[in-house]
Image (spheres, helix red, strand yellow):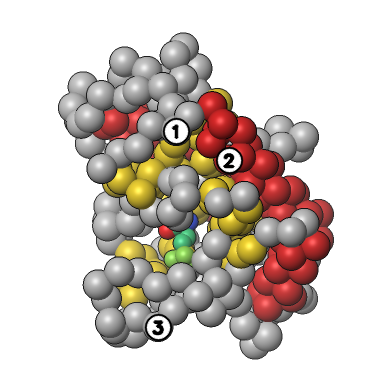
Amino acid sequence: MITIKSEREIELMRESGALTAQVLDLLEKEIKPGMSTKQLDSMAEAFIRDHSAVPSFLNYAPKGDPDVTPYPATLCVSINEEVVHGVPSIKRILKEGDIVSVDCGVYKGGYHGDAARTFVLGIIDEKVQKLVDVTSECLERGIAMAVEGNRLHDISSAIEDHARSFRFSVIENMVGHGIGSELHEDPAVPNYGRKNTGVRLVAGMTLAIEPMIALGRSRRAISKRGGWVAVTEDGKPSAHFEHTIVVRLGKAEVLTRTFLGR
Ligand code: MF3
Ligand code: CO
């Protein structure tokens, strides 16, 4: 069931969204080669709790999958061939040339915000830099379609078409989602699909749009039994950007945008 949020609910989501964006701004400022992914996680958790909020992902357990243990951290930090759900660790040290997807969820006032950015450490391969830039553009193109009167897969096809025009690969088995009082609500928001199909978008729907795009040919992200992290099938790098948005008439409202303009 897709819920339409009232302006009162959206006001609360603006607050959790803004806080989510602030966490990513903080991490963007602090992230450096030599740090562990756990250091980023501790920073994010402290910031969130200092702002009377709770990390959305911590202890999150997907419904109906007894194989997977509850998520043990505040952030997902996914490096290079890791697509999503990299679990922070003191043993995982960032290095120059890495691309690092940092995904953060914040729960405050009864509502979630969810956003991700892929950071680039130092000088990286030109092709990989292009992947990161195009994935960010895919998100913006998806958001541009999230207006009342359009249909759900207008978002999906805009993302897919842009990625494909650079011969990048869309990860198909991981999707965006509705968001609100639950982190994952209906509908699923795929990053591929045919335009002019899917449910009709209505003002007040709140969506987390999150393209995951890879070099190479992998169309799936695979995880080991019981593990969280999901990697490309061919070990090629993958990028990931995410915003929480509200469908509006004319132009979507982005709840996780910041002063950095991201
Ligand atoms: N942004 C991701 C998602 O919406 C992160 C979820 S991590 C989890 O699926 F631990 F909460 F699952
Ligand atoms: Co999400």
Disc ID at residue 13? 2
Identify the residue position indicated by label 3 in the image: 69
Mark 3 is surrounded, within 10 Å at the Cα level, by few (under 14), some (14 to 19) or many (20 or more) other residues, namely: some
For badge 2, the amino acid type reads: Met
- Mark 3 secondary-structure assignment: loop
Tags 1 and 2 touching, CB below 8 Å: yes
Identify the residue position indicated by label 1 in the image: 5
How far apart marks 3 and 1 lie (CA) works out to: 31 Å
Left or right of 105 in this view: 6: left
Q: Is residue 29 visible?
A: yes
Residue lying at the far top in this picture: please name it.
250
Mark 2 is surrounded, within 10 Å at the Cα level, by few (under 14), some (14 to 19) or many (20 or more) other residues, namely: many
Q: Earlier in the sequence, mark 3 or mark 1?
A: 1
Q: Choose top left, top right, bottom left or bottom right for residue 98.
A: bottom right
Q: Residue at x 70, y 48 (%)?
A: 19
How far apart marks 1 and 2 lie (CA) works out to: 10 Å
Q: Residue 43: give x, y in percent of width and height.
A: 76, 68
Q: In the rendered image of this protein, does residue 15 appear above or below residue 98?
A: above
For badge 3, the amino acid type reads: Thr
For badge 1, the amino acid type reads: Lys
Q: Earlier in the sequence, mark 1 or mark 2?
A: 1
